[in-house]
Image (cartoon, helix red, strand yellow):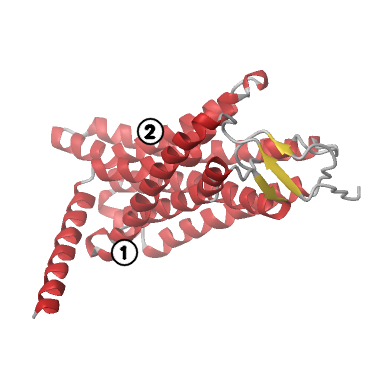
Amino acid sequence: MENRTDVSQFVLVGLTSDPALQVPLFVTFLIIYMVTLAGNLGMVLLILLDSRLHTPMYFFLGNLSLVDFCYSSAVTPKVMAGLLMGDKVISYHACAAQMFFFSGFATVENYLLASMAYDRYAAVCKPLHYTTTMTTNVCSWMILGSYVISFLNASIHTGDTFSLSFCRSNVVHHFFCEIPSVLVLSCSDRRTTELVLVYVVTFNIFLALLIICISYTFILITVLKMDSAMGHRKAMSTCASHLTAVSIFYGTVIFMYLQPSTAHSDTDKIASVFYTTVIPMLNPVVYSLRNKEVKSAFLNLKSAFILWMRKTALGFWF
């Protein structure tokens, strides 16, 4: 069927039309985005600068932080522009780009969490073989595979969505160009596109969850076999941050997509706010609060920065 599109731009309904709420919401989103930017880019910088963090776990964590920053940046600035200036119009191509980058980076996060679960399995269950199992090449291929698969998926979903015809309403009942919200505006037969979306997203989520569940099943068995209480604590502290991140991410996704279709309304927007803005902000906090190595690296970097500032000040005056 020939693609016939009379729509050159879309109008995002946004989070609210109440003027009294727009400024407070803008300030809230601005604070969240600044914390997200500082936390995630700070984590990447910390891992790059501290040689003690050049291990597989932090290699994955650095990529997770970069992905969190990227997929939050695909959505949040446009939301803030809509709240502050009332700019709710997004061009056809900008909508496609936002959809592509958001779905791509969100899927990368899905597979990164699965890769990190396997890394924790190797660390706890096969500690003597950890360095030979999680080599630089293995980690690099796992990261590369996550990106390639994810952006291939994003290309399929975005291409399928924008190959449809849009000749009716151009009002997207959401605050960003999420695939289901744009699909409903099409005047083409979208059943095949919706089925592909459901099957591929379900496959991605359940494959990652299967890897995570199998990894943690083996970890639990190994921990239960340990005689030492210190061994129990060390194993659980190794996995605690990752388990927290997994619970937050998949808890939100499952809540979002396993609701009855009649329940999808403003609840969708609340859940979407959580996984587009709050989760990227929380991940660096989760991984730094309970991680002594990250805290130590941060304090060392802080001390080095203060020392550099003092030397610079002394050089200026003398």
Looking at the rendered structure, the secondary structure element under dot 2 is helix
Looking at the rendered structure, the secondary structure element under dot 1 is helix
Q: Which corner quadrant holds the C terminus?
A: bottom left
Q: Looking at numbered disc 1 in the image, what kind of residue is underneath it?
A: Leu
Give above or below for 141 relative to 71.
below
- Tell me where residue 63 sits by quadrant: bottom left
- Sort mark 1 into few (<14), some (14-19) or many (20+) by Cα contacts within 10 Å: some
Q: Nearer the viewer, mark 1 or mark 2?
A: 1
Residue 45 placement, left or right of 140: left
Residue 236 placement (x, y as % from top left):
25, 36
User: At x 38% / y 53%, what residue is drawn?
Assistant: 60
Taking the image as drawn, is residue 228 in sight? no
Q: Which residue is mark 1?
A: 48
- Sort mark 2 into few (<14), some (14-19) or many (20+) by Cα contacts within 10 Å: few
Residue 121 placement, left or right of 288: right
Q: Earlier in the sequence, mark 1 or mark 2?
A: 1
User: At x 60% / y 54%, what residue is drawn?
Assistant: 151
Q: Looking at numbered disc 2 in the image, what kind of residue is underneath it?
A: Thr
Q: CA distance from mark 1 to mark 2?
A: 32 Å
Q: Which residue is mark 2?
A: 217
Numbered-mark total: 2
Residue 130 placement (x, y as % from top left):
30, 54
User: At x 24% / y 63%, what residue is drawn?
Assistant: 50
User: At x 13% / y 72%, what residue is drawn?
Assistant: 313
Q: Which mark is residue 92?
A: none
